[in-house]
Amino acid sequence: MLPVMGLVTPVLVVLTAESGEWLEDRVRQSALVGEHAERGPGPTPWAIALFVLTVAVWLLGRADLRWERDRGGEAGGPTDGGASAVARSASSVLVRVVALAIALAVAVGATVQVYRISDSGAKAARQGRFSTSGSGAGW
């Protein structure tokens, strides 16, 4: 379920960028509108990276559950090899921490991009007017 929810974000980002291109044809052209339009596709790579990280974290969780189930859920038991179980647990924690740190960095980057786009769009909206007819060039 998590990867499916993670896929929603890049899909919505692409749809939003496409709707922005539609809107660009219906507003008066200005430097602010141009700046906003140029930034529109910016979050797409960030959204794709978040999706990839979502799938990776989901797979890590599934692998850990499978490993726990296979060893019977008993640490230090005869089937887990003692020290190797501790090493596996430590490496699992390290991988999770690294994945979390990368996900956090990507989320911050995506948030900054969305803020920059929103700010430029708000400035452009305060400056111009919207037209329901095509091509805002005549405004």
Image: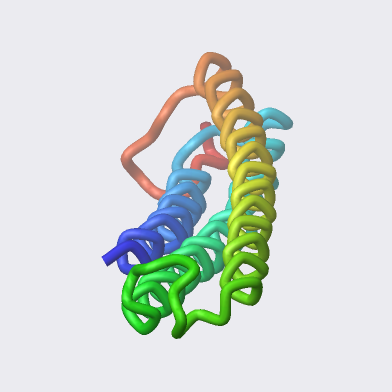
Q: Residue at x 44, y 71 (%)?
A: 64
Q: Residue furthest top?
A: 126
**Along the line of sight, which residue is nearer the eye, 36 or 103?**
103
Residue 110 point in image, percent of width and height: 61, 43
109 is higher (above) or lower (below) than 120? below
Picture quadrant of residue 37: top right
81 is higher (above) or lower (below) than 108? below
Answer left or right for 120 relative to 22.
Answer: right
Residue 32 point in image, percent of width and height: 68, 28
Residue 68 point in image, percent of width and height: 38, 73
99 is higher (above) or lower (below) than 78? above
Picture quadrant of residue 71: bottom left
Answer left or right for 80 relative to 41.
Answer: left
Q: Residue furthest left?
A: 1
Residue 70 point in image, percent of width and height: 36, 83
**Along the line of sight, which residue is nearer the eye, 139 or 59?**
59
Answer left or right for 68 relative to 25.
Answer: left
Which color scheme does this rendered protein use? Answer: rainbow
Answer left or right for 79 relative to 115.
Answer: left
63 is higher (above) or lower (below) than 31? below
Q: Residue at x 41, y 30 (%)?
A: 130
Image mark count:
0
Query: Where does the N terminus fall, quadrant-wise?
Result: bottom left
**Along the line of sight, which residue is nearer the eye, 59 or 138?**
59
Q: Residue furthest front?
A: 78
Q: Residue at x 35, y 44 (%)?
A: 133
Q: Residue at x 58, y 64 (%)?
A: 89
